[in-house]
Image (cartoon, rainbow, N blue to C red):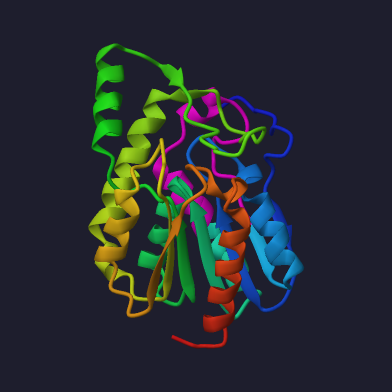
Amino acid sequence: MPRYSILQCASPFYYQGNETGVLLIHGFTGTTQSMRFLGEEFRDAGYTVSAPRLAGHGTAPQDMEVRTYIEWMHDVEDAYAELKEKCDNIFVVGLSMGGTLALHLAEKYNDITGVVPINAAIEMPEFKKTYEDYVEQEERFVTGIGSDIKEEGIKELAYRQAPVKSMEQLLLLMDEVKEKLSIIKMPALIFSSEVDHVVPPENSQLIYNHIQSDEKEFVKLEDSYHVATIDHDKELIVSKCLQFFKKYETKRF
């Protein structure tokens, strides 16, 4: 496999803090750049923060094209295991496909203290139909989905082209995670942009309805599009997350 250089601002980042860890997971075709603001805010609040770079992301679309959703699962599982060695409590926060992977971790590890999906992808019929059309047309790369941001002048570091093969991997990931949502019982904080041009907002409601958490909160983001972590509502996300961490970090489940 060719070796690809990591794009500037796309590297994984880690901040050592207290004994509560926060795992941040970026989205499909995106990078850790979309999670940097949250990471720095959580670091400044004293938390230990880890943001891995998913396989094939932050390099080149040709790199992503040969990666599988199983690799992305392993990436976040490894990052979780590393945090677990240093932290008593762990919260998992993910954007878009990162939210899907956060839910995967919540399904696999019931000792996670809390899960925070932000515009997570679970069920996208139009996306599936588009993928099938691309396959039929024998397309290899198509226009990317990055930078769905309401605030002017803000750009997401994401691929301008998305590999069609990777679209299939996202569909497979969503199917697997959706099937097991009822396993999730830890506290959950679910964010959903009212206007999202990438993931239909109904996905967040589906997650809220199907997880079995006794303590769960649904927060609407009224002034952001899909990449809400670097949009107008980024401070609201931080504020709500810090309240959520504070409420549950001393509990043991």
Left or right: residue 179 compared with residue 12: left
Residue occupying image coordinates x 26% and y 47%: 175
Residue occupying image coordinates x 27% and y 54%: 178
Q: Is residue 117 above or below residue 167?
A: below
Asked if residue 16 shows in the view, the reply is no
Left or right: residue 125 compared with residue 164: left
Residue occupying image coordinates x 27% and y 57%: 206
Tell me which segment is drawn in magenta: 51-77
Which part of the image, by quadrant, shows the C terminus?
A: bottom left
Which part of the image, by quadrant, shows the N terminus?
A: top right
Q: Is residue 210 above or below residue 198?
A: below
Q: Position of residue 81 (x, y in %)?
A: 55, 66
Res 8 → quadrant = top right
Q: Is residue 128 above or below residue 211?
A: above
Q: Position of residue 13 (x, y in %)?
A: 70, 52
Magenta span includes 63: yes
Q: Camera-side residue: 188 or 49?
A: 188
Q: Is residue 252 above or below residue 126?
A: below
Asked if residue 11 shows in the view, the reply is yes
